Amino acid sequence: MKKLREILKRRLLSTKDLGDAASLCRELVLSDLDGAGTFLFLAFCFDDIRRRREGMPVDADEYESAISESLPLISSCLDAIEAFDPPAMVARMDSLARTLVRKPPAK
Protein backbone atom coordinates (compact mmCIF):
# COMPACT_ATOMS: atom_id res chain seq x y z
CA MET A 1 0.00 0.00 0.00
CA LYS A 2 2.99 2.25 0.40
CA LYS A 3 3.41 2.44 -3.39
CA LEU A 4 -0.27 3.29 -3.82
CA ARG A 5 -0.01 6.10 -1.29
CA GLU A 6 3.03 7.47 -3.16
CA ILE A 7 1.02 7.54 -6.40
CA LEU A 8 -1.84 9.30 -4.62
CA LYS A 9 0.57 11.96 -3.33
CA ARG A 10 1.19 12.89 -6.98
CA ARG A 11 -2.54 13.81 -7.07
CA LEU A 12 -3.37 11.56 -10.08
CA LEU A 13 -2.51 14.36 -12.48
CA SER A 14 -1.46 12.12 -15.36
CA THR A 15 -3.10 9.20 -17.09
CA LYS A 16 0.07 7.25 -16.27
CA ASP A 17 -0.54 7.82 -12.55
CA LEU A 18 -4.13 6.63 -12.97
CA GLY A 19 -2.98 3.53 -14.88
CA ASP A 20 -0.27 2.79 -12.32
CA ALA A 21 -2.75 3.15 -9.45
CA ALA A 22 -5.23 0.82 -11.16
CA SER A 23 -2.55 -1.76 -11.88
CA LEU A 24 -1.26 -1.65 -8.33
CA CYS A 25 -4.79 -2.03 -6.95
CA ARG A 26 -5.32 -5.12 -9.12
CA GLU A 27 -2.07 -6.55 -7.73
CA LEU A 28 -3.29 -5.87 -4.19
CA VAL A 29 -6.53 -7.74 -4.94
CA LEU A 30 -4.43 -10.85 -5.57
CA SER A 31 -2.23 -10.36 -2.50
CA ASP A 32 -2.87 -11.70 0.99
CA LEU A 33 -3.73 -8.18 2.16
CA ASP A 34 -7.27 -7.67 3.45
CA GLY A 35 -9.52 -5.30 1.54
CA ALA A 36 -9.60 -7.00 -1.86
CA GLY A 37 -13.04 -5.61 -2.61
CA THR A 38 -11.91 -2.07 -1.93
CA PHE A 39 -8.84 -2.49 -4.11
CA LEU A 40 -10.94 -3.88 -6.95
CA PHE A 41 -13.38 -0.98 -6.62
CA LEU A 42 -10.48 1.52 -6.67
CA ALA A 43 -8.94 -0.20 -9.72
CA PHE A 44 -12.25 0.18 -11.58
CA CYS A 45 -12.47 3.85 -10.52
CA PHE A 46 -8.92 4.66 -11.64
CA ASP A 47 -9.39 2.82 -14.94
CA ASP A 48 -12.68 4.60 -15.61
CA ILE A 49 -11.20 8.03 -14.95
CA ARG A 50 -8.17 7.22 -17.13
CA ARG A 51 -10.36 6.03 -20.04
CA ARG A 52 -12.50 9.14 -19.83
CA ARG A 53 -9.47 11.44 -19.73
CA GLU A 54 -7.94 9.72 -22.74
CA GLY A 55 -11.15 9.84 -24.75
CA MET A 56 -12.26 13.42 -24.38
CA PRO A 57 -11.13 16.89 -23.35
CA VAL A 58 -11.23 17.44 -19.60
CA ASP A 59 -11.68 20.76 -17.84
CA ALA A 60 -8.57 21.07 -15.65
CA ASP A 61 -10.32 23.00 -12.87
CA GLU A 62 -13.20 20.52 -12.64
CA TYR A 63 -10.75 17.61 -12.68
CA GLU A 64 -8.65 19.14 -9.90
CA SER A 65 -11.75 19.86 -7.83
CA ALA A 66 -13.09 16.32 -8.18
CA ILE A 67 -9.72 14.73 -7.44
CA SER A 68 -9.18 17.02 -4.45
CA GLU A 69 -12.49 15.85 -3.03
CA SER A 70 -11.83 12.17 -3.84
CA LEU A 71 -8.24 11.76 -2.62
CA PRO A 72 -9.04 12.12 1.11
CA LEU A 73 -11.79 9.52 0.72
CA ILE A 74 -9.39 7.14 -1.02
CA SER A 75 -6.81 7.68 1.72
CA SER A 76 -9.41 7.05 4.40
CA CYS A 77 -10.36 3.78 2.66
CA LEU A 78 -6.72 2.72 2.87
CA ASP A 79 -6.57 3.82 6.52
CA ALA A 80 -9.63 1.69 7.30
CA ILE A 81 -8.04 -1.33 5.63
CA GLU A 82 -4.85 -0.87 7.64
CA ALA A 83 -6.88 -0.51 10.86
CA PHE A 84 -8.98 -3.55 9.89
CA ASP A 85 -12.17 -1.55 10.30
CA PRO A 86 -14.64 -3.01 7.77
CA PRO A 87 -17.56 -0.73 8.70
CA ALA A 88 -15.40 2.37 8.17
CA MET A 89 -14.03 0.92 4.92
CA VAL A 90 -17.53 0.34 3.55
CA ALA A 91 -18.66 3.80 4.64
CA ARG A 92 -15.64 5.42 2.93
CA MET A 93 -16.18 3.42 -0.26
CA ASP A 94 -19.82 4.49 -0.26
CA SER A 95 -18.83 8.14 0.16
CA LEU A 96 -16.26 7.82 -2.62
CA ALA A 97 -18.77 6.22 -4.99
CA ARG A 98 -21.32 8.95 -4.30
CA THR A 99 -18.68 11.63 -4.81
CA LEU A 100 -17.54 10.16 -8.13
CA VAL A 101 -21.11 9.95 -9.41
CA ARG A 102 -22.00 13.46 -8.22
CA LYS A 103 -18.77 15.06 -9.34
CA PRO A 104 -16.99 12.87 -11.89
CA PRO A 105 -13.34 13.83 -12.51
CA ALA A 106 -13.84 13.38 -16.25
CA LYS A 107 -17.20 13.56 -17.99
Image (tube, helix red, strand yellow):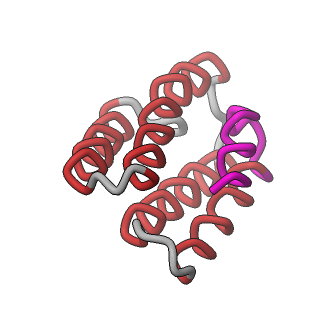
Q: Nearer the viewer, residue 56 or 70?
A: 70
Say above or below: 61 vs 74.
above
Q: Position of residue 77 (x, y in %)?
A: 41, 46
Q: Position of residue 25 (x, y in %)?
A: 58, 65
Q: Nearer the viewer, residue 93 or 49?
A: 93
Q: Is residue 72 magenta?
A: no
Q: Position of residue 105 (x, y in %)?
A: 52, 35
User: From the viewer's perspective, is 14 left or right of 5?
Assistant: right
Residue drawn at 47 percent across, 64 percent down:
39
Residue drawn at 32 percent across, 48 percent down:
93
Q: Nearer the viewer, residue 91 or 47?
A: 91
Say above or below: 79 vs 22.
above
Say above or below: 74 vs 51.
above
User: From the viewer's perspective, is 49 left or right of 35?
Assistant: right
The image shows a total of numbered marks equal to: 0
Q: Position of residue 59 (x, y in %)?
A: 62, 24
In the picture as drawn, the residue positioned furthest to the front comes out as: 83
Residue drawn at 40 percent across, 61 percent down:
38
User: From the viewer's perspective, is 21 left or right of 88?
Assistant: right
Q: Is residue 10 magenta?
A: yes
Residue drawn at 34 percent across, 56 percent down:
84
- Using the rendered view, name the quadrant where residue 35 is placed: bottom left
Q: Nearer the viewer, residue 2 or 100?
A: 2
Q: Which residues are magenta?
A: 1-16
- Using the rendered view, name the quadrant where residue 60 is placed: top right
Label the magenta part by its dominant secondary structure. Answer: helix
- Using the rendered view, name the quadrant where residue 1 is placed: bottom right
